[in-house]
Image (tube, rainbow, N blue to C red):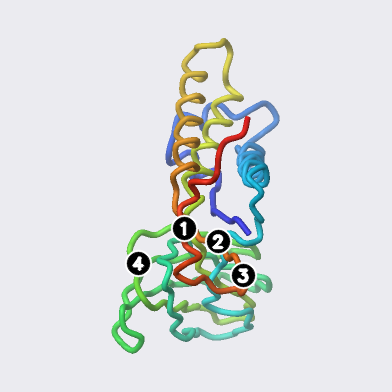
Amino acid sequence: MIRTGITNDSILDLSPALQNYYPQGQTTFQEQIDEALRQIIRELKKNRKDIRKYCTPLELQPSVSKSASFTGNAVADTLERMLWQVKVTTYTDICGFVLSGCNTELGTYTTIGTLSFTGKGTKYLVFNDTFKYYKVTITTAVATTYESYLIESSFYHAHLFLSTALAYRTAIKNEGDRMDYFSKMYEQKYMDEITTMVTSYDEDESGTITEGEVAKTTSVELLR
């Protein structure tokens, strides 16, 4: 399953000017984000790829209910995943999560990032510093049910660039104008990214990725 964590804020961080160009009737570019992922999936299917075999997540914390602060167990990651996901399914009051990493299972863990929740939902954090082991800590004093994963971030930039290209496309007034230029520029960035990126492919659908299942997606061609 391909999950990237791209949000409206991701697009605005890349191109802040777009906040002034939401399409009529929209307050975010979520429609463009969704369409970009659909296009990526269509391209992969044209190349006879099984979508479910991409980006097998690493479970840091299976679904668990807590009413007090709790630190999960250390989990080893061999793929250098760089996208953290937390999903809160039962929410009572404000709760926070900390992702920490260390290169030895019993060593001193370094804080990588935090996520705070004021309601049920799913949040993501992309990070750059990778470790061999990870833990997730929750800070809460009330009933909270949550789960957490590390996800491979290989599709992140492809999805971001295509989402941004589609966002600019909605603002084009005339062919060749400034918005048309940026739309084409980010579409080219997307095409360069998706044809050269490195990702994992769970060929045997075992739920774990072996060294031989991490390969360049050079066989992905943009079949227009």
The residue at the point 43 percent across, 38 percent down is 14
Q: CA distance from mark 2 to mark 4?
A: 20 Å
Give the percent coordinates (x, y) of residue 58: 53, 72
Within 10 angstroms of label 1, few (less than 14), some, or many (20 or more) residues? Answer: few
Q: CA distance from mark 3 to mark 1?
A: 14 Å
Q: CA distance from mark 2 to mark 1?
A: 7 Å
Circle 1: element type: strand
Q: Residue furthest bottom?
A: 106
Say what amino acid the circle numbered 3 marks: Asp
Give the percent coordinates (x, y) of residue 74: 43, 84
Name the residue that disc number 3 marks: 204
Is there a contact, CB below 8 Å, between mark 2 and mark 1? Answer: yes
Within 10 angstroms of label 3, few (less than 14), some, or many (20 or more) residues? Answer: few
- The quarter in which the C terminus is drawn is top right
Between discs 4 and 1, the one toward the N terminus: 4
The residue at the point 53 percent across, 46 percent down is 219
Say what amino acid the circle numbered 1 marks: Ala
The residue at the point 54 percent across, 54 percent down is 5
